[in-house]
Image (cartoon, rainbow, N blue to C red):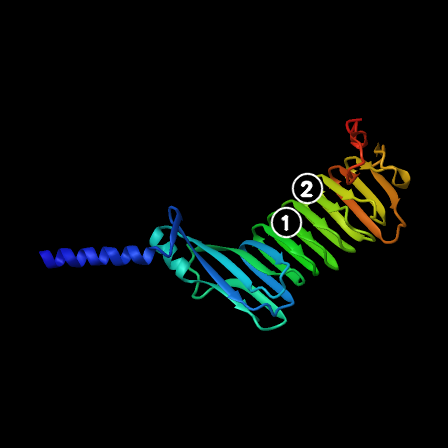
């Protein structure tokens, strides 16, 4: 009797010890966290997450290690099945010593019908790299990157702060918030608002669009382009002539303006919603520059 009791206690303790590497998120869901560091060789990062989210943060120190932190989460019809699903999930990192580093995740064994999984990636890497990120169901957040950036989310919000040769961000169902100081920009969402801060750009061109949602574009003293804005169902609120930045409301659903020396065309288009173009305030600006009547 005593022996069987001792054996039972040992088994319970072993199970408890094994479970410390896991965390029960909610009933029938578990997760684990993994972290990997490696030397910064890559000039390009390609991140794929069928289900999950990505956060990429550029670092000033180009010699600092790349750090990839992954939070894997699995769900199933009961906790035991969820643990089996989690065991079958694997983070993949290819090309640690190559020009292009590919990061993603996969099922190590055949996925069972009741299993579902997702991974949240956080990546720290030198800022002077190109980033190509594609997720199916989740958010994308990329900051302090000075290389070309391409961000895609089929169902999720995109946030970015970049300064590379180009920025492209696309989402089907989600908003876009982008701060960009480079020459070429493409921002597109099907259903969501768009907020683009281009106040630190100089010559810039490209296209910003949404089917269903409002758009706000902020420009600065040095922004130079030919602005072409149009909306099917909405209004366009535009800055005044010759960088006077006295706001006026166009009565039509389209407007054109030349900023600075002009140059390339920046096209703004909305199907259902309004477009507002405004100037970034400086210390000498007064509050009188704000839009006074957008309801007319």
Give the residue drawn at x 77%, y 44%.
Answer: 269
Residue at point 76% right, 55% down?
182
Question: Position of 107 compared to 47: left or right?
Answer: left
Q: Nearer the viewer, residue 2 or 132?
A: 2
**Which residue is outermost to the bottom?**
97
Which residue is depicted at the point 29% across and 55% down? 16
* 2 or 1: mark nearer the eye: 1
**Res. 97 image quadrant:** bottom right
Q: Say which quarter of the image contains residue 286.
A: top right
Which quarter of the image is occupied by the C terminus?
top right
Q: Mark 1 sits on what residue?
A: 158
Q: Which secondary structure lies at badge 1?
A: strand
Badge 2 marks a residue whose secondary structure is: loop
Q: Position of residue 75 (x, y in %)?
A: 42, 52
67 vs 212, nearest the viewer: 67
Vertical order, 159 against 213 (above or below): below
The front one of 230 and 220 is 220
Q: In this view, which residue lies farthest toward the left?
A: 1
Q: Position of residue 14 (x, y in %)?
A: 26, 59
> Which residue does the numbered mark 2 point to in the structure image?
193
């Amino acid at each position: 009797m005593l022996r069987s009791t001792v054996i039972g206690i040992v088994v319970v303790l072993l199970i408890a010890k094994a479970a410390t590497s896991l965390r029960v998120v909610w009933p029938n869901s578990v997760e684990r966290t993994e972290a990997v560091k490696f030397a910064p060789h890559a000039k390009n990062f390609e991140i794929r997450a069928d289900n999950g989210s990505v956060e990429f943060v550029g670092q000033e120190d180009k010699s600092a290690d790349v750090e990839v932190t992954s939070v894997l989460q699995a769900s199933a019809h009961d906790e035991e099945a969820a643990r089996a699903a989690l065991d079958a999930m694997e983070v993949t990192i290819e090309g640690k010593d190559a020009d292009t580093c590919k990061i993603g995740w996969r099922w190590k064994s055949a996925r069972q019908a009741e299993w579902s999984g997702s991974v949240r990636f956080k990546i720290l890497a030198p800022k002077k790299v190109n980033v190509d990120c594609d997720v199916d169901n989740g958010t994308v957040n990329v900051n302090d990157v000075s290389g070309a950036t391409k961000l895609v989310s089929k169902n999720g919000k995109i946030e970015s702060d970049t300064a590379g040769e180009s920025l492209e961000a696309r989402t089907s169902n989600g908003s876009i918030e982008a701060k960009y100081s480079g020459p070429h920009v493409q921002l597109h969402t099907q259903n969501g608002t768009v907020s683009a801060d281009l106040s630190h750009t100089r010559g810039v061109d490209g296209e910003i669009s949404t089917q269903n949602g409002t758009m706000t574009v902020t420009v600065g003293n040095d922004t130079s382009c030919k602005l072409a804005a149009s909306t099917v169902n909405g209004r366009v609120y535009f800055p005044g002539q010759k960088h006077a930045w006295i706001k006026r409301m166009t009565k039509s659903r389209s407007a054109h303006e030349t900023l600075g020396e002009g140059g390339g065309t920046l096209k703004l288009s909305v199907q259902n919603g309004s477009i507002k173009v405004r100037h970034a305030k400086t210390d000498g600006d007064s509050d009188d520059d704000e839009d006074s009547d957008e309801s007319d």
